[in-house]
Amino acid sequence: MLNIVIFGAPGSGKGTQSERIVAKYGINHISTGDVLRAEIKNNTELGKIAKGYIDQGQLIPDELIIDILAKTLDSFEDSKGVIFDGFPRTIPQAEALKKVLAERGQSVSIMLDLDVPEDELMTRLIKRGQESGRADDNEETIKKRLVVYHSQTAPLIDWYKAEGQYCHINGLGTMEGIFEEICKAIG
Ligand code: AP5
Ligand code: MG
């Protein structure tokens, strides 16, 4: 089983690199952000709750997101592993992931930390906002997402170092070059 946590600030390239990893290694992909945006699009109860948080650049409460994760995991059959994109984002989420995997006799194989300078993150997300219009890709909300990243999510770097699963990836450069570095790390 290859269970990868792909980690990084908003705009660091988690979704972009996940696509490549899925194509090469044939594992399943869970993007909690994509799941929530689909719920919003379908106007479900969960979507209505999620929208309030996403539009403010805040995190959805841990209990809700952990429930989504467990359900999505159980929907995969004959899986070779999973790439977790945008999850975990808090220490309680990381602890929950460890537990959910352990209950299935599994663990995280590697945590890839896509490290990108803040001005580049801003440039990428503003550009995407202009081109494809994700509701949270505007300057004000991006700034809030970055604050939330630093206060609630970045502490996971030390958490995964302590687990011995941490791997730093330089997330600045071409998408192909970064993917090569990731493949070496997965090795
Ligand atoms: P989520 O959807 O996870 O968004 P995010 O973390 O803010 O990150 P993005 O998806 O914006 O960026 P990315 O790292 O995937 O980069 P991408 O590849 O797209 O979460 C959204 C919201 O949902 C959260 O704010 C929260 O409210 C909620 N949520 C989600 N998960 C949650 C959880 N676990 N707990 C609680 N709440 C949760 O790339 C970005 C752009 O840059 C693209 O346009 C891309 O083409 C471009 N790009 C990529 N790589 C490069 C490169 N090397 N060079 C130049 N451009 C590049
Ligand atoms: Mg993404």
Image (cartoon, helix red, strand yellow):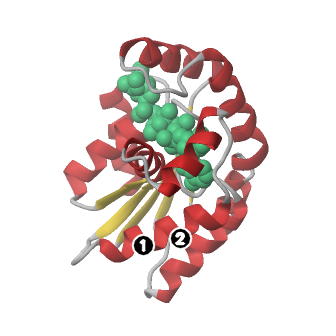
Q: Residue at x 45, y 44 (%)?
A: 40
Around disc 1, counting alpha carbons within 10 Å, would you say few (fewer than 14), some (14 to 19), or many (20 or more)? Answer: few
Answer left or right for 43 relative to 26.
right
Indicate the quadrant where residue 79 lies.
bottom left
Across and down, in percent, residue 96 comes to 61, 73
Answer left or right for 117 relative to 159.
left
Task: Work out whether residue 141 can be spotted.
Answer: yes
Nearer the observer, 125 or 184: 125
Answer left or right for 179 relative to 93.
left
Identify the element where label 1 is drawn. helix
Q: Which mark is residue 71?
A: 1
Q: Residue at x 54, y 48 (%)?
A: 48
Identify the element where label 2 is drawn. helix
| Quadrant for the C terminus in the image | bottom left
* Ligand 2's quadrant: top left
What residue would you read off at disc 2? 67
Q: Residue at x 42, y 20 (%)?
A: 133
**Residue 179, placed above or below residue 153:** above
Answer left or right for 85 relative to 99.
left
Across and down, in percent, residue 161 comes to 67, 59
Q: Which mark is residue 169?
A: none
